[in-house]
Amino acid sequence: CEKPDARPLRQRLLVVANRLPVSAVRRGEDSWSLEMSAGGLVSALLGVKEFEARWIGWAGVNVPDEVGQKSLTKALAEKRCIPVFLDEEIVHQYYNGYCNNILWPLFHYLGLPQEDRLATTRSFQSQFAAYKKANQMFADVVHQHYEEGDVVWCHDYHLMFLPKCLKEYNNSMKVGWFLHTPFPSSEIHRTLPSRSDLLRSVLAADLVGFHTYDYARHFVSACTRILGLEGTPEGVEDQGRLTRVAAFPIGIDSDRFIRALELPQVQDHIKELKERFAGRKVMLGVDRLDMIKGIPQKILAFEKFLEENSHWRDKVVLLQIAVPTRTDVPEYQKLTSQVHEIVGRINGRFGTLTAVPIHHLDRSLDFHALCALYAVTDVALVTSLRDGMNLVSYEFVACQDSKKGVLILSEFAGAAQSLGAGAILVNPWNITEVADSIRQALTMLPEEREKRHQHNFEHVTTHTAQEWAETFVSELNDTVIEAQIRTRQ
Ligand code: ADQ
């Protein structure tokens, strides 16, 4: 009989992502300080309690010596994290190069970089070689830690080669792959020189997931048009083997946000912010400073709104919080200067001695400060040019149950599919339309705001991060069982 204290064994989940959810800083030869890092995937998986999850990924530091590698491995083990050690050259070619310079812009419809289109394919080829090598290094670490029955969940565009490497090690390993960015139209994907290799490798997984049905459809089209395979309602079939392809829209740990609003320090912060911006409507943007987030377009739309609605000039403030990312990349440095220049110009134009219309911060906010900001906001502006999902829109909705503010949301964010009925949807490239939507949001009647908020709040609190992860993993388990039954028949 079962022992009274026996608890059901939880399935081990190996979450493989480029970055571990912690950043490591070396303090001495064998001492490390570890800090949780912000980001979409981290926020989503923080809420998952159903599995015994372990993370495998790069810790974001170069550790060339053995003493350092051993001590970091030990420190990370306490946080259930297993490091993959990548040297500087690999990071440069694989992460900065192939992932961030090629796949990231391509998947967000920004095309391939000019030099790779025009010049020799040498740099492209060496970056792709480094990408494959890095993926193999991830596979080696997964293989070392894998135990029979584990589920391996690979994440994102950094690891498209991983499913193939894993199946080469062990064909019975349960492998899922999920893409956090959009998967672009097959017409975009086919411009990529390594288009077929990547598709074939992803197809080695048992289950392939995307945020939306459209991204899944684009992926299946790419496999049919580029590889000549057969697309079925379940996925993609290659010589009798089915790779299941489906949409699994991510969510957030909404309870964590709702509970945080009750904390005294958050309440104090809310009070301070209300006093600080008394008499003005608060508009908010929270983004990583990335070209896909459409920050310049958003600020230009706000300028147009102020131009055309002079009576609003001293009654509204835009708080734009932008965490710098990829700061060593020239395009990102250029974007930062561009944003600063526009903000400076608008504040110079519409500011007074006592107030400015835009507060722009180039930094990350801690969780409690972020919750307080979400709670006092009247209108949130999420104007991504493309975005896999966009969790900021979900976080805003979770913190708005008393205020019932308005969400202006890009139709090119995956979130438009789930929050579209409650939000005001806009084409972020159309500055006039966004400016009009700001006016509409600021003047919306309370009953209308309530109705729209209710729709979104219900969605955000039921389609959570936990539900997302559980659905993906149980679908993966089922897919593997079904495939075993099919091969026995
Ligand atoms: P991201 O591009 O990072 O994620 P997003 O989904 O908005 O975009 O998540 C950002 C996260 O970082 C949020 O949890 C947010 O709170 C936090 N964050 C952003 N700016 C911050 C700031 N200034 N201070 C503190 N925290 C901040 C990628 C894809 C998205 C997809 C997610 C999850 O690009 O489309 O939704 O993965 O799959």
Image (cartoon, rainbow, N blue to C red):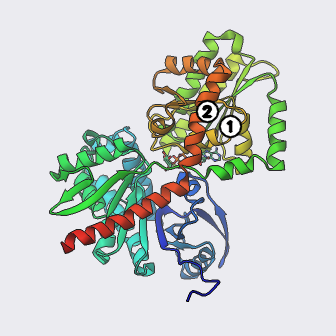
Res 286 seen here: yes
Q: Are marks 2 and 1 in contact (CB under 8 Å)?
A: yes
Q: Could you tell me which secondary element the residue under label 2 belongs to?
A: helix
**Image location of residue 362, percent across then percent down:** 65, 41
Question: Eyeballing the image, is 29 above or below 199?
Answer: below
Query: Label 1: how many residues lie within 10 Å, few (<14), some (14-19) or many (20+)?
Result: many
Q: Residue furthest bottom?
A: 1
Q: Amino acid at mark 1?
A: Gln
Residue 453 got which mark?
2
Mark nearer the viewer, 2 or 1: 2
**Image location of residue 152, percent across then percent down:** 42, 69
The residue closer to the viewer here, 188 or 43, is 43
**Mark pair 2, 1: CA separation:** 8 Å
Query: Label 2: how many residues lie within 10 Å, few (<14), some (14-19) or many (20+)?
Result: many
The residue closer to the viewer here, 314 or 457, is 457
Q: Name the quarter where the N terminus is drawn.
A: bottom right
Question: Eyeballing the image, is 454 above or below 426?
Answer: below
Q: Residue at x 60, y 74 (%)?
A: 76
Q: Name the quarter where the C terminus is drawn.
A: bottom left
The residue closer to the viewer here, 22 or 218, is 218
Residue 400 got which mark?
1
